[in-house]
Structures are given as C-alpha cells and as structure tokens.
Amino acid sequence: MRNFGSLVISRSIGSVLSTGPSGSAINTLTDDIFKYDIDFNDDVGADDRFSVVVDQTWRDGELVATGPVQAATFTVGGKLHSGFRFERNGKAEYFTGDGRPLKRSFIRMPIPYARLTSTFGNRYHPILGRMRMHEGVDFAASTGTPIQAAGDARVQFVGWKGGYGRVVILDHGHGYTTLYGHMSRFGSEHVGQRIAQGTVIGYVGMTGLATGPHLHYEFRVNGVHRNPLSITMPPPEPLSGLALAQFRAQTGTALAKIRRVEDVIYADATPVATKGRKKA
Ligand SMILES: [Zn+2]
C-alpha cells in the first residue's frame, strides 16, 4: 500500500542548534529559499523559528521518499518570511506569497562571505605604480575558492586576457554581462553554454596582474562598467496570468498547514514535529 502525505516541521533555531539540523530541508532553507533575504551568519537568533512542508511517500508503513521543500516560513526578529515552491516553465523556483521570485536576478558577491579588498573607482595600482580606474571590485579569498555565476547566463568567454589572467565572461541578457578575473582554473563550462545562477565557473587565483589571490569582478550594463555593490539590480519577473492563479491555489493549502501546526506548537512554545498523513 502506498500513501502520500505531507510533513510539517516546525522548530526554533535554539532547538536546531541543540539537536542538530533536520537534514536537507534545513539546507534548502538557507541555501535556496531565504539566502537573499536573511543573513544566516548574523541575523538569526535562538528565538527565531521556521516551518517547512515537505511531501513524503510511504509504502507499507515505511517512509520511502521525501520530496523537496514545498513551502517554508522563517520568522526572524519577529519578521515573517515565506517561500513557496512552484514550477514555472518546467523549472522549480521559490516565490513569496504574492508570486514574486525569492531568487534575485543577480547575487551581489560571486564568492559568499569573501572580504572586499578593493572598491570600484580610481585607485593607485600596486603593480603599474600609477593612478588608474578600477573597473570592478576585488574580493580576497584563498587560491582554489569556488567562484559562482552571479546570475543565469550564457557563457560568452573562457580563456586568457592579458592582465586579467584566466577570465570568464557571462552574458545575462538584457545588456548585462559579468567578468571574473585572475582565476587559478576554470569550472567545466564552455562558450555558448547556458548556466544557472550559482554554478561554479572557476576558482580564485592570481593569474595575470595580481599581487595575491583574489577575484576581480566586473559588472557591465550595455558595455558600461558599473559598481556591482551599489547598482540597483533588475527585479526578476513575477508570476502572472494562469501561472499566478495556479500558484495561488497551491500555496493556500501549504500555508494553512503551516499555520495549523504553528498554532499548536507555539501556543505552549515546545518545538515538536507534527505529521499529517492522508491516503492517496
Ligand atoms: Zn580588480
């Protein structure tokens, strides 16, 4: 006999830290759903809490499969964040309750948590020994640190370019391109290939003109260099029409499940897992 159901997990961060994370669902929360809105290094405290809904398949009373996170809420400092999984054009993404993608069109830093060592603008060039416009930003990181594609893109260039050393250029469409320099080695991408945001395209190094291992990162709009740390990024496209209607129908059920469980749990503030199963 095969059963399908959904599991709602609700936890406070304090209980996760003391009992260990509940598997891949937690990684999905931090890596896929809320990484653009919540700083998991600094923002999250022991009193904050989250809930996730995952689909499960049972056979003869045994759990045989756990699906991806269907819906999640994260309450940080009293502020509620929610995310819902929905397939747009055959590709799963996470959206806010009103159908806006949680994913940004660009991530600010191609190396998470790296240290900014040189800002955008005029500066004294340490190797050339004169003032020169710095047309990007530099992030210090040790050789071999993975570098991620800032947004979904088509690979425009992979190769050697003078002072940049080993460089990758990505074309994000709508006039946006990004450049990643001084790499020690490339990822497995090739020119013309379509890659997703977050794909590792290479590794930090000091090829070309560099005094130490770092990533030189450039952001261009219609060929003009812009500061990637301050430019207003284009908003991703929200759901509309039929897709939005389907999304609304799906999310209502998931959110109601979370609310039901949270009402029970946080009424007496004891974190527990609650399981709701129904026959297929
Ligand atoms: Zn630089």
Image: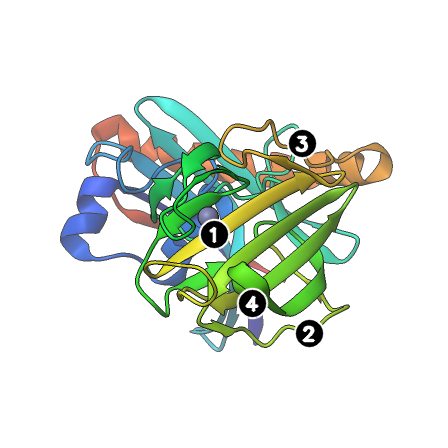
CA–CA distance in space, label 4 to label 1: 52 Å
Mark before the other along the chain sequence, 3 or 2: 2
- Determine if the C-beta at disc 1 is less than 8 A from ligand 1: yes
Disc 1 element: strand
Residue 198 appears anywhere in the view = no
Q: Which of the numbered marks, if any, corresponds to residue 3?
A: 4
Measured along the vertical axis of the image, is residue 127 above or below residue 107?
below
* Dot in front, 3 or 2: 2
Mark before the other along the chain sequence, 3 or 1: 1
Mark before the other along the chain sequence, 4 or 1: 4
CA–CA distance in space, label 3 to label 4: 40 Å
Residue 27, x across and y down, in percent? 39, 56
* Dot in front, 4 or 1: 1
How many marks the image carries: the answer is 4
Disc 4 element: strand
Q: Which of the numbered marks, if any, corresponds to residue 235?
A: 3
Q: Which residue is mark 1?
A: 216
* Dot in front, 1 or 2: 1
Q: Which residue is mark 2?
A: 190
Farthest residue in the top direction?
Answer: 78
Dividing the picture into quarters, in which one does residue 224 lie? top right
